Image (cartoon, rainbow, N blue to C red):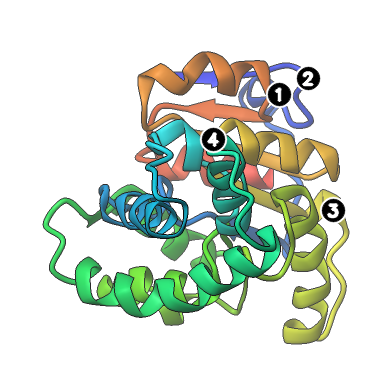
Amino acid sequence: MWHSCAPCFFSVRAVYSNLIVHNRTKQLILFDIDGTLIHPGTVARKLLDKMVEEVANASPELQVDDVAGYTDPIILETALERLNFTDGSLSDTIETILSNYPDRLEKLFNDHEDAYVYDDAVRLLEACKKEGWQSGLLSGNVRKAAKIKLKRFGLWDSFEFRVFGDDARNREELVLVAEEAALGALGEPYTHNRMVLVGDTAQDAIAARANGVRSLIVCRRPESRIAIENANPTWLVDSLDEIERIILWLKAE
């Protein structure tokens, strides 16, 4: 089932009833990682939880909703504040955890059987490339962790540029960083009406709306639907399988 959520910058109904299609020859499609390109399983969340417990002597008991859509630094900040952590500087503690996190993640993630790639997202990425559109990575993971996750599935080199959780504090700011990164990597500016954020959380939709960017949000977890709908994504879908329909929507004026 496909859902068009108001306010909607680009109406699917307009695409099909009026057949008005604008040739967007230069578009920038920004892909999220966890929940969009891959299902990361539980290993990363459990590792962050464990590393917080090691410094705070208590578990923050991180759940999916505590991590989905947030940058790694914010996840750790929230976890430590939940435990009323006061032993030293909060920012220094977060920096220390994140400096050690990738090495520990790599030892666990490559053997983690619960992680897998979403084939529909990979097919969409390939279809966007065939249209001649540029693709970028926008992830709340810190860079080294993102690389570990994507290299396992051969996806790391699939993007013209990448921005991460160590490039900005939150997702709204990451969209602005992506705009700057695109200019540096591609040699031309992309206005926000030519950018699309493909994600799976309410935070993705919020970040896109805050920057005047269209969002294509895939609801991988039924329990997240209400929160996503309340965030007013441009288009909410249950899967990315209908590639031709998505491409037509991406082209629509």
Q: Under tag 1, what secondary structure?
A: helix
Q: Name the residue under label 2.
A: 7
Q: Name the residue under label 3.
A: 192
Which is nearer the eye, 11 or 118? 118
Q: How far apart are marks 2 and 4 (CA)?
A: 17 Å
Please, what is the three-letter code of the amino acid marked with disc 4?
Answer: Thr
**Is 133 located above or below residue 158 in the figure?**
above
Please, what is the three-letter code of the amino acid marked with disc 2?
Answer: Pro
Looking at the rendering, which quadrant does residue 102 occupy?
bottom left
- Report whether residue 136 is seen: no
* Mark 1 surroundings: few (<14), some (14-19) or many (≥20) residues within 10 A: some
Which numbered disc, 2 or 1, marks the residue that appears first in the sequence?
2
Who's the residue at 53% across and 13% down the image? 226
Please, what is the three-letter code of the amino acid marked with disc 3?
Answer: His
Q: Name the residue under label 1.
A: 14
Who's the residue at 16% across and 51% down the image? 114
Residue 205 placement (x, y as % from top left): 66, 35
